[in-house]
């Protein structure tokens, strides 16, 4: 029994220490003015957006995205919100720079570090 308690405490300590190595960043995205009207989109822009969604999906599957969504559905005020759970700012920056919508200039993105103090329990 004593060994079991020691093992459980060891696992909890290790999990806590690993969680503390991660940082949380807000990555918000906005379409540049030229693309805020969908009639301006060509097949190329539709492909870029498809690649953007696939990129975010792969980041979610690799547990780097905590949450992602769209703040406004209309293109005129269309802004995306991504909460990244990564090791440091440099990793967050690389993620943003590798987003197909950012790389091609279709969107602009901003990164802000956030500290989460309250989180809904599971």
Image (spheres, rainbow, N blue to C red):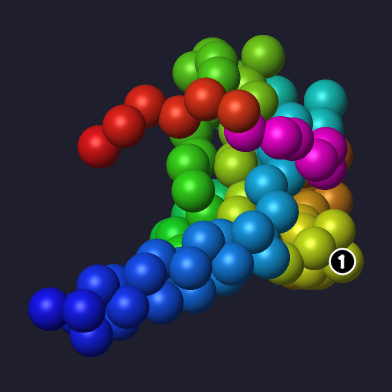
Out of 102 and 60, give the one closest to the viewer. 60
Q: Is residue 34 above or below residue 100?
A: above
Q: Is residue 80 left or right of residue 53?
A: right
Residue 115 shown in magenta: yes
Disc 1: CA contacts within 10 A as few (<14), some (14-19) or many (>=20): few
| Residue 16 rendering spot, x and y as whole percentages | 51, 61
| Residue 26 rendering spot, x and y as whole percentages | 71, 38
Q: Is residue 50 visible?
A: no
Out of 100 and 122, give the one closest to the viewer. 122
Furthest residue toward bottom: 3
Find the magenta span and give its range. 111-116
Q: Quadrant of residue 20?
A: bottom right
What secondary structure prevails in the magenta region?
strand
Q: Is residue 14 left or right of residue 77?
A: left
Out of 108 and 18, give the one closest to the viewer. 18
Residue positioned 72% across, 45% down in the render: 25
Q: Is residue 8 above or below residue 52?
A: below
Dividing the image into 4 quarters, which one contains the C terminus? Answer: top left
Residue positioned 49% across, 74% down in the render: 14
Q: Is residue 117 above or below residue 44?
A: above
Dividing the image into 4 quarters, which one contains the N terminus? Answer: bottom left
Out of 105 and 118, give the one closest to the viewer. 118
Q: Which residue is mark 1?
A: 90
| Residue 41 rendering spot, x and y as whole percentages | 63, 40
């Amino acid at each position: 029994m004593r060994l079991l308690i020691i093992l459980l405490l060891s696992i909890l300590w290790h999990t806590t220490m690993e969680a503390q190595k991660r940082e949380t960043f807000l990555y918000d995205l906005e379409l540049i003015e030229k693309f805020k009207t969908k009639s301006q989109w060509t097949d190329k822009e539709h492909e870029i957006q498809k690649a953007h969604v696939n990129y975010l999906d792969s980041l979610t599957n690799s547990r780097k995205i905590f949450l992602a969504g769209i703040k406004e559905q209309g293109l005129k005020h269309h802004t995306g919100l991504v909460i990244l759970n990564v090791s440091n700012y440099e990793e967050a920056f690389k993620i943003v720079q590798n987003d197909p919508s950012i790389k091609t200039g279709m969107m602009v993105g901003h990164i802000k570090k956030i500290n989460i103090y309250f989180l809904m329990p599971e």
